[in-house]
Image (cartoon, grey):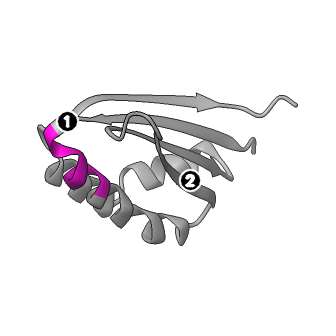
Amino acid sequence: MAKLTIVANIKANPDKIDLVKAELLKLIDITRSEEGCINYDLHQDNENPAHFLFYENWESRELWQTHMGAPHLAAYMEATDGAVEEFKLSEMSIIG
């Protein structure tokens, strides 16, 4: 199985930065313990605090899809409903 890299860009509404950050931080430990998770690293833009980025590596796309259906992701979606201005996810493969 081919490994999968995920780059997820999350832009919070300016008045919801603290809420989105707190909810994103809740995802880290539980996701890192999931089967297939190699790394799950959250970043915050130094110049735009509303911009967050997850850099993730997974053993396979199937295991990442299992993660995407996890209850803690559903709880995040519910908690941040209306607080995220933009979300862009890229599925990528290491080529070098």
Looking at the image, residue 43 sits to the left or right of residue 75; the answer is: right
In the displayed structure, 19 sits above or below 11; it is below
Residue in the picture at 83% in, 28% down: 95
User: Residue beneath label 2, please?
Assistant: 63
| Residue closer to the observer: 49 or 85 | 49
Numbered mark located on residue 14 in the image: 1
How many C-alpha atoms fall within 10 Å of the one at disc 2: few (<14), some, or many (≥20)? Answer: some
Looking at the image, residue 36 sits to the left or right of residue 51; the answer is: right
Under mark 2, the amino acid is: Leu
Looking at the image, residue 59 sits to the left or right of residue 22; the answer is: right
What is the distance, in whole Å, between disc 1 and disc 2 at their CAs? 33 Å
Q: Secondary structure at mark 2?
A: helix
Can you give x and y, in whole percent of width and height, for residue 13 in the image?
A: 19, 34
Is 20 magenta? The answer is yes
Can you give x and y, in whole percent of width and height, for residue 61 in the image?
A: 59, 43
In the displayed structure, 4 sits above or below 27; it is above
Q: Earlier in the sequence, mark 1 or mark 2?
A: 1
In the displayed structure, 85 sits above or below 70; it is above
Under mark 1, the amino acid is: Pro
Can you give x and y, in whole percent of width and height, for residue 56 in the image?
A: 59, 48
Numbered mark located on residue 87 in the image: none
Looking at the image, residue 46 sits to the left or right of residue 62; the answer is: left
